[in-house]
Image (cartoon, grey):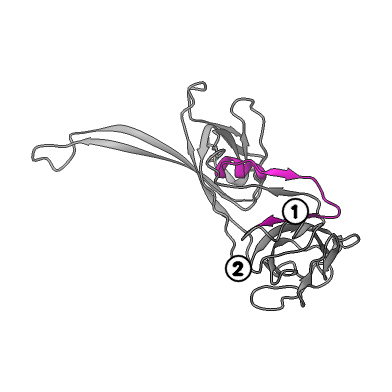
Amino acid sequence: MALSTPRSFFGVHSVTPYNRETKNFMGTIKVLKGSSLSLSGEQVELTGGSSKYPWAVEESTITAEMSLKIAQFEDFLFELFLGKAPTSLAAEATGNVSTLTNGKGSSVMSATTGIASVSAKSGGSADLKFGKYVVTAVSATTVDVSFSSDADLGRGANGTYQNDALKVNASALTITASNPVELTNFGIELTGGSGTIALVTGDTATFEVRPANSGAMTVRIGSSADSSFPEFGAIVMSSKRGNGELMELDCFRCKGAGMPLNFEQNAFAEAEVKVKVLYDADKDGVFEVRYIK
């Protein structure tokens, strides 16, 4: 009888986390640069006397750690590795302008003596630009608006920075009672309060804008009140070889904490995530290997 063809596996196809209690899949990671399961064991040596060599060796603990090199960032990854499930937002055909919130002082956002609201101008949704805005009082009745980044300034009508402080309005915007004033080329209106406008110079307020979109998400990471890193199971699938061979690992009990969010020059974001693979008492094991020839 001739020797059998050596068993091997090629590449990585996907990693699919699942809920350990319900067994439901959370999603799948397809854009992978690599996945490895490292099993490193410690050995305890018995030494003594004049012998330069151990008298005996026994196995100690074995550490199982999975390394995932990912290039996609789905909602479930934020939940597993950064401790908070994102809020998924439905498509917004005309975009979204958030509520104005006071920053320094309390005079800019005021229903009576300041700016009562910020909103998208009717018919101006195509000019909304993604980012964060700061409204600064420059007199008792006028404000300047600055914008966080020029990455989206070209959406719709072109926006323009006026100075190095990132101001985007050419002339100060005058706030009048109950009337809107337009931030030109940005599709935004600021509406004055119902009373006598009395801004305090130097006070600020902020708001955020999402342009028209087919979906969005938001998540706040690091809250002491709700950060939780759930245990999960994970199925790692090799690429399918030309002869039909496939190798699968089912890691029963996994735990991760931490995921870098890398922004590199002219490159898609990649992150390497470390995951501990633990003993599962119900399965009486750590992981299972399945293979088809």
Q: Quadrant of the C terminus?
A: top right
Q: How many marks?
A: 2
Q: Which of 98 and 64 is in front in this view?
A: 98
Question: Left or right: where does residue 224 sit relative to residue 160?
Answer: left
Mark 1 surroundings within 10 Å by alpha-carbon count, few (fewer than 14), some (14 through 19), many (20 or more): some
Residue range highlighted in magenta: 75-102
User: Residue 29 placed where, x, y %?
Assistant: 64, 44
The quadrant holding residue 124 is bottom right
| Residue drawn at point x = 66 percent, y = 63 percent | 204
Which residue position holds label 2?
265
Q: Distance between the residues labelled 1 and 2?
A: 30 Å
Pick out the residue farthest to the right: 123
Q: Residue 108, relative to residue 230: is it above or below? A: below
**Circle 2: residue type:** Gln
- Residue 79: give x, y in percent of width and height: 60, 41
Identity of the residue furthest to the left in this view:
50
Q: Is residue 16 above or below residue 144?
A: above
At a point 47% along the width and 32% down the height, the residue shown is 278
Give amino acid for label 1: Ser
